[in-house]
Image (spheres, rainbow, N blue to C red):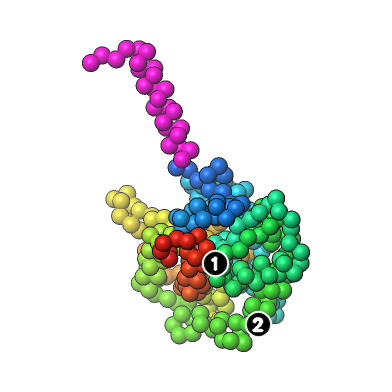
Amino acid sequence: MKISAKEKAMLKRSIVILSSFLFVTTCFTEENILIPHSAEEYCELAKNLKNFQDMITEFPDNPSGENVMQTRVSFKNPAAGFNNGGLCWWHSRFQRKAHYLAYYLPNAPKPNADEAKHIIEDIIDGKKVVEIPGFNNLQEFSTEYKDYLIKRFEKWQWHDTLTGAWIKGLKGEKLSSEQAAKKLKITMDELYKKVSDQNQISYQMLQMKGVVAHAWLVTKMTERKNSNNERIGYTLYTIDSNTPLRSTQYDYTYGQANFKLPYGRKNEFVTFTQNEHELRDIYDAISRYCHLEETH
């Protein structure tokens, strides 16, 4: 059957329109994955946990860096806490809880100091969804309450020290940075299942030699493959509290025994996932608030 020139032109135009529609609906940009500004928007977002990952991660399909920055704690890991050694663990844990559990009411009056402290306490407790009036996003809120947040992270550090909670990641073989390549492969394969298959934002401890430890959040992972389409490792997209306003990308290849931070002298480390109970509490809080049928 012959197609006329007019029909060809109409078909070509239809293909262009359809292609544009598919591009808009499949790329994560400021137009579709937005920071929720109402309970309704929040619960719509929460129907798919992958939305929380996409909103906070800079990766090839989500180049909207400015929008991503708005989902982050505005200040980096401070020189505070014990011996001014930093508060990276608590900075990262707060970042994850706030990202999952808060939505914003920018047109409402701002909270007073006491009300803001109660909001921060609820986020740290991590067992309920909170609304934050008077602010557009976490970046704005954490900028205004930076000084209080740092003091609160220090208090959190003291609490974990007195209860022994901090030592959970610093015992047994997990203290060693000479973790075998086989062990690291198992760790990375398990992490990929959590982050990619289950759409989790995972909190990980980074263990250096001795008792030095850091932390990061893994928000996204993709497979790395060779020319034969065989998996050879993963690309990790992380939030490091030392550079909180941008994602840091790490390539892992089967056979390597550790990672290296792009800064510092003691920069070789291995990883292990921790504080999964906090994520379960978060999921339960989301399910209760949004009346979802199943706990994620």
Q: Is residue 265 above or below residue 175?
A: above
Quarter that holds the C terminus: bottom left
Q: Tell me the residue at 47%/61% (across/down).
A: 291
Q: To which residue does mark 2 refer?
A: 158
Q: What's the CA distance linking mark 2 and mark 1?
A: 20 Å
Instruction: Give, as a single range, the part of the protein colored magenta.
Output: 1-25
Query: Is 270 in front, or is 193?
Result: 193
**Res 89 quadrant in image:** bottom right
Residue type pointed to by label 1: Trp
Mark 1 crowd level (few <14, some 14–19, many ≥20, 10 Å Cα): many
Residue type pointed to by label 2: Trp
Would residue 216 appear left or right of 182 to someone viewing this image? right
Q: Tell me the residue at 50%/46% (across/down).
A: 28
Query: Is 25 in front, or is 247?
Result: 25
Would residue 57 appear left or right of 8 to someone viewing this image? right
Q: Is residue 163 visible?
A: yes
Numbered disc 1: secondary structure: strand
Query: Is 4 in front, or is 132?
Result: 132
Q: Tell me the residue at 55%/52% (across/down).
A: 40
Q: To which residue does mark 1 refer?
A: 216
Please tell me how many numbered marks the rendered image carries.
2
Numbered tag placed on residue 21 in the rendering? none
Numbered disc 2: secondary structure: helix
Would residue 210 appear left or right of 105 to someone viewing this image? left
